Amino acid sequence: MDGMTPLPPSTGQDAELVIAVENLRVSFRTDEGVITPVDGVSFSAKRGKTLGIVGESGSGKSVSTRALMKLLPRNALIDPTSRMLLHVGREKQVDIAPLDPDSKAMRKIRGGSIAMIFQEPMASFSPVYTIGNQITEAVRLHRQAANSPLAATETVGEQIEENILGHGKMTKKQAHEIAVEMLHRVGMSNAGLRVNQFPHELSGGMRQRAMIAVALSTQPALLIADEPTTALDVTIQAQILELMKELQDDLGMSIIFITHDMGVIAQVADEVAVMYLGKIVERGPTRRVIANPHHPYTVGLLRAIPRMDNLTRRLTPIPGDIPSPLERPKGCPFVTRCPKRMAQCAEVMPGDTDMGDGQSVACFLHG
Amino acid sequence: MTDAATPTVNGALPHNDAKALKYYTASQWQLVWWRFKRHHTAMAGALFLLAMALAGLFADFIAPYSTTTRDRDYIMGPPQMPMAWDSHGFSLRPFIHGVTTKRDPVTLRKIATIDPDKREYLEFFMRGEAYTLFGLIPSNIHLFGVPSGHIHLFGTDELGRDVFSRTLFATGTSLSIGVLGVMTAFVLALIIGGTAGYFAGWIDYGVQRVTEIVRVVPVIPLYMGLAAAFPREWSNIQVYFAMTMIFGLVGWPTLARRVRSHLLAQRGEDYVLAAELSGARPARIIGKHLLPSFTSYIIVDLVISFPYMILSETALSFIGLGLRPPSVSWGIMLQDAQNIRAIEQAPWFFIPAGFVVLAVLAFTLLGDGLRDAADPYSVNK
Amino acid sequence: MSRFIIQRLFGMLVTLFFVSIMVFTIMELPPGDYADRYAFRKYSGTGINVTESDIQNIRVEFGLDRPAPARYLSWIGGILTDFDFGQSFAFETSVNRVVGERLVLTLALLYATLILTYAISIPIAIYAAVRRHSAVDYGLTIMSYLGLALPNFLLALILLYISVTVFGSSVGGLFSPDYVDAPWSFAKVGDMLLHLIVPSLVLAWSATALQLQTVRATMLDELNKLSVTAARARGLPEWKLLLKYPARLAINPVVSTIGFDVNRIFSELPIVALVLSLPELGELLIQSYLDLDMYVAGAILMMLTFFIVFMNFLSDVLLAVLDPRIKLEGG
Ligand SMILES: Nc1ncnc2c1ncn2[C@@H]1O[C@H](COP(=O)(O)OP(=O)(O)O)[C@@H](O)[C@H]1O
Ligand code: SF4
Ligand SMILES: [Mg+2]
């Protein structure tokens, strides 16, 4: 049985949007007062493409992507002016922002339209159920029985619509078959055996593969990968990145890839958004941003990549620590650490300046 | 995700740099103390226990009577609460209503009735029965009393003895048995757990087995079995110390387990090896280097094991296998409440039970607070 | 699995062996021996003058003149081969007959208490953890502190007081007067079950308080696990998710502490039984300690411990079934 149906190839130069986030602002009520670790960010992801979000730990990457799935804790508040448009069909869009986290519509989107993988593959699985159990759970929640017209849907949008509206649950046996096939698909040998194993019986790399299998088993339009390789060693990291690329080529889903490592961005992302203290400070096509970084923070992140041609040079991480959201500077968020700061930087927040070719930067050095 | 509430290595210094500096340079004990102070319930528990301990310690002075003084005119009499005013008006000095006794013409038994027209004014620092405080200082000054008649804040028992006075003395006895029991258990745990944890091997195996046995035998039946063996002719003092001994004997394995696991964890650390290489003796290494590394946890364990000792003493004395009259402890006083007829007529026999509950509650709150304070990674659960 | 079970069974036997030595020591602890007490009991007040040689004869008759290890062997041998726990001199019959029915009643009380404890604590604690800072959650905290501070026998006394003063009848006893000496019948069992409610509630009191805290704490831990977020990200409905993931794991510490709960219940049983006059083993244990009827006491101590050890074993096996992470091969 064919468990995986590739999405039809994208039409034209301008790939369709899967998600468009506009002016997302997330606050938390804490003992020390209200903090806003994500402060008005906008980004979008296109079909078959990967958006990389890069930034140091604490810059708000996880919070902004978890907001997309309404997975934030109770003390979180998504600003009502934020918009998170999930594209359903060519013209139709669903705004996720006002949806109730516990609503049926939201549950359909979770796992069905947007799937997520996390940094710790071990902790992502419950230790008391088999890998197969957790895949079939997702499959049965979101996929239709074989005779449903899912395979025939034309576009991502229709497919999402189908996922939201569809009925006709799969049997456990069918779901199990898909689980085995998915495990095979992510490169696990002996998938028929592995499907009945418990997470602790797999190695770290295998667990992350299994996690990818769970996420993609529902044929989501968007995969959010929150530092999926950070906990893995370098060779396995390379294998996983390779696998994700392959699957994206086959299945055509969009990926939002979160990392703190510019080196990884260079390998996987088509576009990149550099995030610092709740703001996107620079964005653009990955090649352009890497070849021609404009923001001092981006420059700093690029310097921290180990380079094959110059292994003797020490990595130069950006000196200093990212401030807590409680101590957000009034002006440019990077002002406390910026080697090029000017008088106005501490007072006024720089706006976005278009640098051409889709690249833009928020820094007084450029505009 | 970093916790925004406390500054962390990643987080920036709080606005007030001086305060932050203080936070970063504080010693471990200062940190524990600061966290503990924020725990209001634990603080309240600590203060309450302090008050209880003082009341027990100075029972001779605070109690108007001794544990055996009988008021034959007021048998099974209800509590008398000092008041500031009655139908005759207001008084600055608190008073109680006096008692008149008549004989029942039929049974010829004396019946005490409260006389609302008779006022007995309270006096403070009044001379009364003689006593020797701590067995050292002879005195006859009592915190309060009434010059004529008697005052019974918690009423009297079947023999006309003052329940308030007896409760104070009982508090002293019960708390001190707890303290001595915990101390005995602690010393045994240190010696045995320390040996087992440090030397590992067969000593460790032996201790593990003993721990296992004490863990599966029901505790109070075990205490009862040991207490049943006390010879009848033993004096009260002997029974008292024998009880602390059995509490220690049964209580050490749990503590020893903790000591042992901490020691096993720390044994391989560099600083222990360094001490060993420089030729320090095991006892010195355990005492000087290892124990201080988890003193705070041990303190928490000790505080937490208190309630079990107190409850066990109460239970044993309650069924007549622990302390025996004329000793007074909470358990002994509660024996009076075993008789359903008695508590029906005199519910104030339950008052010592209130003390037991409050003491255990206070220890539990204190223990919880200390545990949170001692554990830097604790979250408020 | 079978290897694991055999291993645990063996461990259980070793523990029971050591326990039996300790119990025997306790039986031997009181001053004087069985012969002294037997003679005193039998002849005091009868005017017959008992000499030291008479007592010595009794000693020989019961084999008490032999050294302690030999006496231990014949005691444990009797139990193992004939299930014979010796003689009760207070009742002047065999220990087995004295213990008899009380054993069944004790077990009925134990299981009723365990069922109550878990039926109350698990759902409430799970709910309180999910709805943290709700009224139920605060109620749970207060109840669990109270449950630990108010000992069961005091609760029993208070209930007794209330039942006598308010309802004019006692909640004590395990049977209505009509059934006390009646032969066993369905009506008698029903009557007993009804009478079991109050004692098992009293006995469940502190065990419930402890389990409420444990389950709530584990549940809070589990709720914050990434695997729960991951499952939520798969679109599982919330209550289904809570039951399948965190609640399922919050059961594990309960299972692993079954033996501990049984220990606690048996520990509190004698005094509660005394207050509520329940005709079971705990009450008999106190009586036999007071009479120094040590064969009865030893038998009861052995039986109670046996059940604790057995429930420990059961909980080990159950836990191994519930938690695939537990290695079945190793020690
Ligand atoms: N549950 C929460 N409550 C309060 N603050 C939070 C919570 N979760 C995240 N934050 C804050 O949001 C900031 C950004 O966190 P996160 O998105 O996890 O960063 P990143 O993923 O970029 O490392 C952190 O500095 C943290 O202080
Ligand atoms: S705006 Fe100023 S402080 Fe901010 S990055 Fe640019 S130069 Fe640095
Ligand atoms: Mg993150």
Image: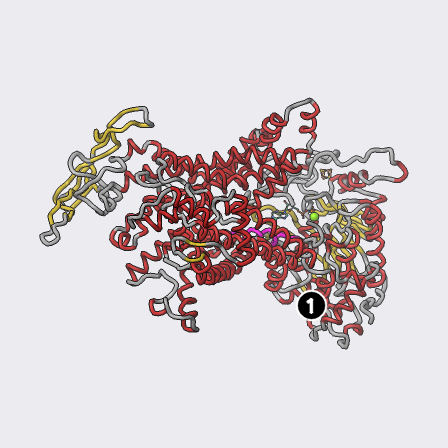
Q: Is residue B17 something one can see in this rendering? A: no
Q: Secondary structure at mark 1?
A: helix
Q: Position of residue C16 (x, y in %)?
A: 57, 50
Residue C130 versus residue B5 in the image, above or below: below
Residue sitting farthest toward the bottom: A147
Q: Position of residue A310 (x, y in %)?
A: 88, 36
Q: Position of residue B14 (x, y in %)?
A: 59, 35
- Asked where in the image residue B198 lies, by quadrant, the reply is top right
Q: Quadrant of the N terminus of chain B?
A: top right
Residue sitting farthest toward the top: B278
**Between A292 and A171, the one nearer to me in the picture:** A171
- The residues colored magenta run C211-225
Ligand 2, what quadrant? top right
**Between A253 and A337, the one nearer to me in the picture:** A253
Q: Which residue is pictured at 81% across the width and 35% down the height?
A: A315
Q: Is residue A108 left or right of residue C78?
A: right
Which residue is denoted by mark 1 in the rendering?
Answer: A141
Q: Main secondary structure of the magenta part?
A: helix
Q: Mark 1: give few (<14), some (14-19) or many (20+) Cα within 10 Å.
A: many
Q: Is residue C13 left or right of residue B163?
A: right
Residue A73 versus residue B231 in the image, above or below: below
**Between B150 and A258, the one nearer to me in the picture:** B150
Residue C168 versus residue A300 in the image, above or below: below
Residue sitting farthest toward the right: A309
Q: Which residue is pictured at 40% across the width and 40% down the height?
A: B230
Please, what is the three-letter code of the amino acid marked with disc 1? Leu
